[in-house]
Image (spheres, rainbow, N blue to C red):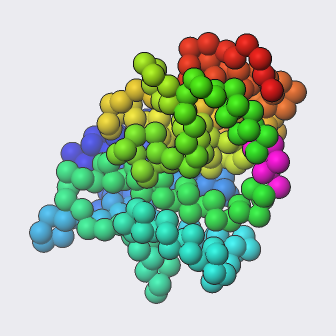
Amino acid sequence: MMKEELCTAFCEGLEIVKVPIGFAVGTNFKTDMGDNLAFYVCGPDKNDLWYLQDDGTTVPYIEASGADLSVAAREEAFQALLADYGAVLDTDTLELKSRVLDRADVPASAMQFVALLLRVQDLALLSTERVHSTWVEEATRMLTGAVAGRATVDLKAAVFPDADEFPADLVLRSEARPPVAVFFGVSDTKIYEALLLQSYAKYQVKRDCEVVVILEEDGAVTKKARQRADNHLIVPRFKGGKSDAIGRIVEVATGSRPEVMH
């Protein structure tokens, strides 16, 4: 049954309702408006093929937030995202749609489609993220220095070769330990991206990794998102305890904290 297959992929929190075009799926990931992120599994057609689509509100919301997708840099980023996930924008309905899928590919592709919907929301946050860049740059510098000679640091990277659709802000790799995916918690969306990667690693590809969300402070995200992160992820706070936050991540990546923190 499609419902069981999707629930296995996402592990928890799905609401699935049969509708004329297929299935309406509600997740426990939140949009920037605070609504549960939802999508449709459409099909099957006469060839037993399926596709995924959003509800047509993602792109209008982004543009209503002031993120003009006709601006060259943002349009380029948007088109690159669609290409990365094999998705297209229906310019008549403003719906985002996946490629055509075999039934067996729907569960994994659904996780990737949700990752796309989360990342598309980031386009509305580009100017906000510039404000947050100072602490992010400082944390990146401190973390890179703290693991020098003990682990490698990759920027904007996939934690596994088959996880390109779930990139982390940083990936730390050291010998004989699972890789560590680090997300900077500048928004709720970043937390949901981290949770999605964790589910993908655990339930889809069944590979070990550690997932970290580093927050500047508790108020940087909503209480609900912060609680979910605290319940499922490693979540150090940077402000007021920089060395401790970085040391905790280094310990996860290498097995021990650095003796000296610069």
Question: Most prominent secondary structure in the magenta stretch?
Answer: helix
Question: Does 147 sit above or below residue 84?
Answer: above
Q: Is residue 241 left or right of residue 100?
A: right
Nearer to the camera, 91 or 139: 139
Q: Residue at x 63, y 81 (%)?
A: 72
Q: Residue at x 33, y 60 (%)?
A: 41
Locate the N terminus and report the quarter of the image it occupies. Answer: top left
Magenta part of the chain: 131-136
x, y (%) of residue 244?
77, 20
Question: Does 87 sit above or below residue 154?
Answer: below
Question: Residue 31: which quarter of the image?
Answer: bottom right
Residue found farthest to the front: 149
Q: Residue at x 78, y 58 (%)?
A: 130
Question: Does 27 sit above or below residue 123?
Answer: above
The reply to whether residue 19 is visible in this rendering is no
Q: Is residue 200 left or right of residue 214?
A: left
Question: Residue 118: which quarter of the image?
Answer: bottom right
Residue found farthest to the right: 240
Question: Does 250 sit above or below residue 183?
Answer: above
Q: Is residue 16 magenta?
A: no
Nearer to the camera, 152 or 26: 152
x, y (%) of residue 144?
67, 34
Locate the C terminus and report the quarter of the image it occupies. Answer: top right
x, y (%) of residue 88?
41, 74
x, y (%) of residue 159?
46, 39
The reply to whether residue 259 is visible in this rendering is yes
Nearer to the camera, 157 or 214: 157
